[in-house]
Amino acid sequence: MDVVSTFFNGSIDMLVFLMQSEGFDLGGDICCLLKGIYGMCQVAKAWYEVLNGIFEAIGFMRLIADQAVWIRWTRDKLQVVMAHVDDLLIGGIRSMVDDTKA
């Protein structure tokens, strides 16, 4: 599964200012970012924190050995989610996969 606009989903926890682009005028010379933009070092960490929070909220546990892998047991069924940048590999029974994607 490819997550669309991944790096725009995480909030940054510091003040970041940038000059406005030529032809873009909001009434000043600089802007303060509320969300990350592509190319910032901080946005990958912010995205990871969003992703981890979502998975923990729906009952997944993160592996200690690999921080980009989450697992969830439901009765006798196992589901595994692996993340790499903006791609997710979701394994398990089809109905569980569909629920996780939703």
Image: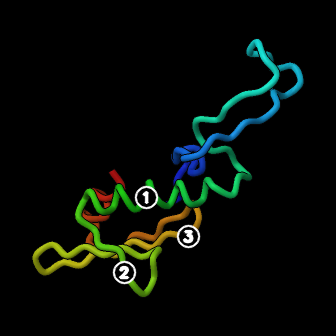
Whichever of labels 2 and 1 marks the residue nearer the N terminus, that label is 1
For label 1, count other residues whose C-alpha is less than 10 Å away and answer few (under 14), some (14-19) or many (20+): some
What residue do we see at 29% from left, 73% from top? 61
Amino acid marked by disc 3: His
Q: Give the foreground label among 2 and 3.
A: 2
91 or 58: nearer the viewer:
58
| Residue farthest to the right, as pictured | 22
| Residue farthest to the front, as pictured | 15
Amino acid marked by disc 1: Leu
Q: Is residue 24 above or below residue 19?
A: above
For label 3, count other residues whose C-alpha is less than 10 Å away and answer few (under 14), some (14-19) or many (20+): few
Amino acid marked by disc 2: Leu
How far apart, in angstroms, are the residues tagged by discs 3 and 1? 11 Å
Q: Colour mode?
A: rainbow
Q: Give the foreground label among 3 and 1.
A: 1
Dividing the picture into quadrants, the one containing residue 98 is bottom left
For label 2, count other residues whose C-alpha is less than 10 Å away and answer few (under 14), some (14-19) or many (20+): few
Q: Is residue 79 above or below residue 53?
A: below
- The residue indicated by pointer 1 is 51
- The residue indicated by pointer 2 is 63
Q: Secondary structure at mark 3?
A: strand
Q: Is residue 59 left or right of residue 90?
A: left
What x and y, as percent, mark residue 8?
A: 58, 44
How far apart, in angstroms, are the residues tagged by discs 2 and 3? 15 Å
What x and y, as percent, mark residue 99?
A: 27, 56
Q: Are marks 2 and 1 in contact (CB under 8 Å)?
A: no
Q: Secondary structure at mark 1?
A: helix
What residue do we see at 27% from left, 57% from top? 57
